[in-house]
Image (cartoon, rainbow, N blue to C red):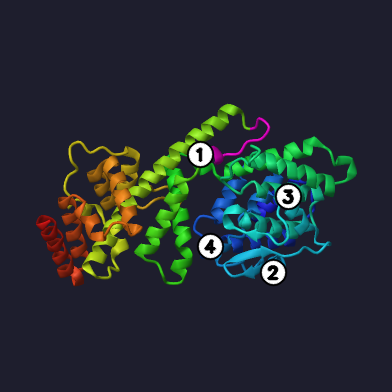
């Protein structure tokens, strides 16, 4: 990481002592390697730096140093830089008044369009803004005002998935307006109206923003899925750190990701500004995002179905099942106990392959094989998987009883799953077997 700071400062012809560069690198490293991080790590940040311009490199290094809801607060190494920025109120953060001499903070407010007293929201740029404040306060002694403004602008555009405003202006266009106004205020009078600065700055911001979401707009569905599952795991990290990792927490994280993706407009994933990237590339980004979102949601549906089945079984049996997460990851031999899929069952081949075999990639965290989930997905088929997920959602929402959910499933498939659960948890074998008898006794009677 220290090498990237050196690369950036050399590219900007800025002389920064090696000791200071090492300090900056240590700050970023400590933030990104917090135990609560699983996706927003040094691996992610350093991947963004490759091939970027010096301003973009500095922005990339700092853009995720604050991840308040995942880290459970401010990282210790930057808390002193942020303690006068916000005030804590029940369930939220609010921006404090800014002292006139705090140029770094004022510049960030101008570029982000934020104001004192504003309530901060993770979905509306809270983490990006606070990360930009850290960057501005640590870099303002080394960079010119214009350079610092450009770094902050690049961080601002990494706020993802924003649609046009009421006037039809995109996130990049709105940023350009604020950069123009801020440049007129902060830069020298000779350059206050320089349109080149605005276009160069926002174009670099577009490049970095698109690199930040490359898993959606450029990568294969498999790579997008790996990133999505890392985010699912990261959202569970605060609970895991508190010793609260459970099937329900896993279900909540999966549902959270699926709900987010269900509302994500593919047109809002990539950024563009003033003809850059070209129109055909923008269309390709949207098409790729749409394909990848669909792929990830199909995978999530398959996993959510087995989660729902296990959750319903434990509720109906009236037992706790500490091996629930282990059952989801059972090996090929156990998964083979399921009945063969119906002849007309069709699935999305790529999703089934990843469920069955996982993804081993030395250049990325990879993906665990879930043979049991693959077998259930193959048995249900693509259409059946979606129908089962709809019923699972009804059960999760309290509109369908766990027993009714189970009775709506194919008997031979569910029976095989019950027997696998009983095999794994010998202490509750009788409870599982009694449940199987009760489910179908009631079902036949009715």
Kindly identify the residue that appears in the image at 20 percent across and 70 percent down. 428
Of labels 3 and 1, earlier in sequence is 3
Quadrant of the snapshot with the C terminus? bottom left
User: Circles 3 and 1: CB distance less than 8 Å?
Assistant: no
Q: Which residue is mark 1?
A: 266
Mark-to-mark CA distance, 2 and 1:
37 Å
User: Circles 3 and 4: CB distance less than 8 Å?
Assistant: no
Q: Quadrant of residue 134?
A: bottom right
User: Circles 3 and 2: CB distance less than 8 Å?
Assistant: no
Q: Secondary structure at mark 2?
A: loop
Q: Nearer the viewer, residue 111 or 444?
A: 444
Mark-to-mark CA distance, 3 and 2:
21 Å
Q: Secondary structure at mark 3?
A: helix
Q: Secondary structure at mark 1?
A: helix
Q: Judge depth for marks 4 and 1 and give the one in front.
A: 1
**Lateral position of residue 28 relative to residue 327, left or right:** right
Mark-to-mark CA distance, 3 and 1:
26 Å
Q: Nearer the viewer, residue 380 or 42?
A: 380
Q: Which residue is mark 3?
A: 111
Mark-to-mark CA distance, 3 and 4:
25 Å
Q: Judge depth for marks 2 and 1 and give the one in front.
A: 1
Quadrant of the snapshot with the N terminus? bottom right
Q: Secondary structure at mark 4?
A: helix
The magenta segment is: 266-276
**Lateral position of residue 88 relative to residue 219, left or right:** right
User: Circles 4 and 2: CB distance less than 8 Å?
Assistant: no
Of labels 3 and 2, earlier in sequence is 2
Q: Nearer the viewer, residue 300 or 27?
A: 300
Q: Which residue is mark 4?
A: 70
Instruction: Residue 22 in the image: state x and y as whole percent.
Output: 69, 61
Mark-to-mark CA distance, 4 and 1:
25 Å
Q: Which residue is mark 2?
A: 83
């Amino acid at each position: 990481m220290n090498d990237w700071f050196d690369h950036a400062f050399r590219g900007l012809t800025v002389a920064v002592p090696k000791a200071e560069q090492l300090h900056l690198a240590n700050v970023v490293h400590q933030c990104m390697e917090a135990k609560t991080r699983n996706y927003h790590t040094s691996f992610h940040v350093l991947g963004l730096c490759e091939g970027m311009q010096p301003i973009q490199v500095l922005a990339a290094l700092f853009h995720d140093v604050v991840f308040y809801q995942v880290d459970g607060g401010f990282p210790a190494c930057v808390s002193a830089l942020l303690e006068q920025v916000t005030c804590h109120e029940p369930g939220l953060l609010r921006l404090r008044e800014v002292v006139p001499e705090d140029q770094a903070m004022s510049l960030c407010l101008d570029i982000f369009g934020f104001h004192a007293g504003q309530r901060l929201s993770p979905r509306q740029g809270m983490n990006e803004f606070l990360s930009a404040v850290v960057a501005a306060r640590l870099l303002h002694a080394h960079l010119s005002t214009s350079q610092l403004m450009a770094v902050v602008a690049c961080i601002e555009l990494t706020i993802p998935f924003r649609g046009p405003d009421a006037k039809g202006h995109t996130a990049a266009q709105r940023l350009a307006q604020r950069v123009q106004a801020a440049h007129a205020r902060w830069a020298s009078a000779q350059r206050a109206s320089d349109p080149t600065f605005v276009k160069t700055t926002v174009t670099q911001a577009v490049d970095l923003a698109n690199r930040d979401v490359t898993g959606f707009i450029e990568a294969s569905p498999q790579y997008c899925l790996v990133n999505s599952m890392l985010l699912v795991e990261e959202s569970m990290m605060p609970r895991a750190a508190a010793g609260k990792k459970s099937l329900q927490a896993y279900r909540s994280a999966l549902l959270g990701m699926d709900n987010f993706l269900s509302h994500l407009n593919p047109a809002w994933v990539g950024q563009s500004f003033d003809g850059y990237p070209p129109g055909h590339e923008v269309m390709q980004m949207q098409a790729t995002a749409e394909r990848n979102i669909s792929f990830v949601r199909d995978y999530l549906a398959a996993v959510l179905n087995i989660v729902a089945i296990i959750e319903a079984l434990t509720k109906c049996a009236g037992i706790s099942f500490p091996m629930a997460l282990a059952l989801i990851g059972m090996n090929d031999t156990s998964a083979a106990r399921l009945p063969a899929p119906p002849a007309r069952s069709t699935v999305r081949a790529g999703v089934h392959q990843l469920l069955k075999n996982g993804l081993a990639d030395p250049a990325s965290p990879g993906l665990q094989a879930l043979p049991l989930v693959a077998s259930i997905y193959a048995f249900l088929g693509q259409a059946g998987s979606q129908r089962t997920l709809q019923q699972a959602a009804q059960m999760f929402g309290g509109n369908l009883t766990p027993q009714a959910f189970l009775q709506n499933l194919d008997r031979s498939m569910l029976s095989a799953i019950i027997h696998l659960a009983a095999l794994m948890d010998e202490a509750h074998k009788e409870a599982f077997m009694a449940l199987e008898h009760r489910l179908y006794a009631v079902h036949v009677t009715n």
